[in-house]
Amino acid sequence: MKRLLRPLGAVVVALGVAVAGCPAVGAHGDEDALVLQPAVTTPGGVVGVRGDLPTTNSIRLVLVAVGQGDQGEVTLARLEDPPQGHFETAVTVPTTAAPGTWHVEAQTAGGAVLAESELTVLAASPSAARDDRAEPVALSPGSTARALSAIRPDVADPATRERAPTVWWPYAVVAVMLLAAVGWVRRHRQREHGRVPPAATSSR
């Protein structure tokens, strides 16, 4: 009998060791995590959030300012019944978030913290806060006059207006007529001087 119990006991001990060394089915263990990508951003930035949590109930992602308690708490997203606690989403950091260290927490509906991860918020760069209106452009007087004449030709600078073509043909006609009149007068006078007076009859 003892010979039969010894092998049976060895089998039981081996099974116990094997069961103790295997993780429980469905347990997350060290996989419980909340991963942020990127972990450094600016106000208004978009951050990817990936979680593997020990729950199948609704999860609330909350942004918490370190050292400010509930006063610095902002809800970023609500995830309804993630399958086996796995989820992947993207959240937007509020534009009012002050630069500093924040925590993104995954909470249950009752407020219990399941996991958290640190998020660093940097101050926005000055270029991002600049006014989008066009910069004023300095124009020289000549370019200003040309631009004005293109919009309102009637108010353009007289110096920049295009000169109208001079009508010359009436003057040419008058000149030709004067020359013709002078020529006619000269010919008429020549004819007058070229006439021979009638010969005088001799008296007897």
Image (spheres, grey):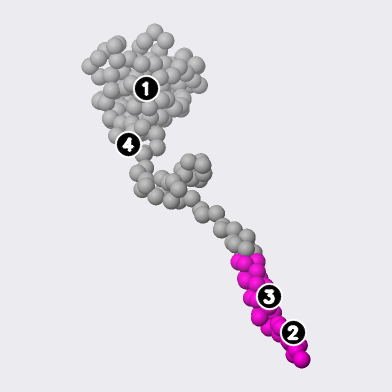
**Mark 3 surroundings within 10 Å by alpha-carbon count, few (fewer than 14), some (14 through 19), many (20 or more):** few
What's the residue type where badge 4 is placed?
Ser
Indicate which disc residue 94 carries: 1
Residue 89 location (% of width, % of height): 46, 26
Give yes or no for contact between labels 2 and 3 (Cβ–Cβ under 8 Å). Answer: no
Q: Nearer the viewer, mark 2 or mark 3?
A: 2
* Contact? badges 3 and 4 (CB < 8 Å): no
Q: Secondary structure at mark 1?
A: loop
Question: Which amino acid, by three-letter code, is at mark 2?
Answer: Pro
Q: Residues within 10 Å of mark 2 (few under 14, many from 20)?
A: few
Q: Tell me the SS state at disc 3.
A: helix
Residue 188 badge? 3
- Which corner quadrant holds the N terminus? top left
Point 41% across, 25% down: residue: 92
Of circles 2 and 4, the one toward us is 2
Viewer-proximal residue among 95 and 2: 95
Q: Amino acid at mark 1?
A: Pro
| Residue at numbered disc 4 | 127
Label 4: few (<14), some (14–19) or many (≥20) C-alpha neighbours in 10 Å: few
Earlier sequence position, callout 2 versus callout 3? 3
The boundaries of the magenta stretch are 175-204
- The mark found on residue 198 in the picture is 2
